[in-house]
Amino acid sequence: MIPRRPRESLERTEREIAAEKAATLGRAGERLEAALREVAVVRARWVTATTPNDRERLAHEYARVREAALVARRTLLIQREALGLRQHRVVDQLYPEPPRLSP
């Protein structure tokens, strides 16, 4: 049996670790959300671009921000795996991979 004070200290430490894990997961989700918002903005600009040069420039920008979003999504999935969360359907539903641009 663990004496009272050490047990309280252990429980407090375990709560702090759990809180940090949750915060880290939350930050990964926030980074992904921000990346997906950026993808949506660039895609909307690409859709409304009127010149071929603008469309080409925005297509390159879209590819760049899409890749950043994919990295953020992988980071979130890895973070979830590290915490023992093996099912990612919720991530797939909430944060689907941004599509490639179709000409």
Image: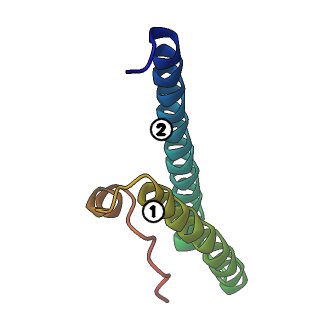
User: Is mark 1 in CB contact (under 8 Å) with mark 2?
Assistant: no
Between disc 1 and disc 2, whose residue precedes? 2
- Residue 65 vs residue 22, the one in the foreground: 22
Disc 1 and disc 2: Cα gap in Å?
14 Å
Q: Is residue 58 left or right of residue 16?
A: right
Q: Which mark is residue 63?
A: none
Q: Residue at x 47, y 26 (%)?
A: 15
Q: Position of residue 39 (x, y in %)?
A: 56, 64
The answer to whether 9 is drawn above or below residue 96 in the figure is above
The single residue placed furthest to the front in the displayed view is: 1
User: What is the quadrant of residue 27 in the picture?
Assistant: top right
What kind of element bears circle 1?
A: helix
Q: Residue at x 48, y 30 (%)?
A: 14
- Residue 16 vs residue 69, the one in the foreground: 16
Q: Residues within 10 Å of mark 1 (few under 14, many from 20)?
A: many
Tag 2: amino acid: Ala
Q: Position of residue 43 (x, y in %)?
A: 54, 68
Residue hosting label 1:
77
User: What is the quadrant of residue 53 in the picture?
Assistant: bottom right
Q: Is residue 39 left or right of residue 8?
A: right
- Residue 56 vs residue 24, the one in the foreground: 24
Q: Residue at x 43, y 52 (%)?
A: 83
- Residue 4 vs residue 95, the one in the foreground: 4
Q: Residues within 10 Å of mark 2 (few under 14, many from 20)?
A: some
The answer to whether 85 is drawn above or below residue 2 in the figure is below
Q: Is residue 52 left or right of residue 40?
A: right
What kind of element bears circle 2?
A: helix
Q: Position of residue 16 (x, y in %)?
A: 54, 27
Residue hosting label 2:
22
Q: Dividing the image into 4 quarters, which one contains the N terminus?
A: top left
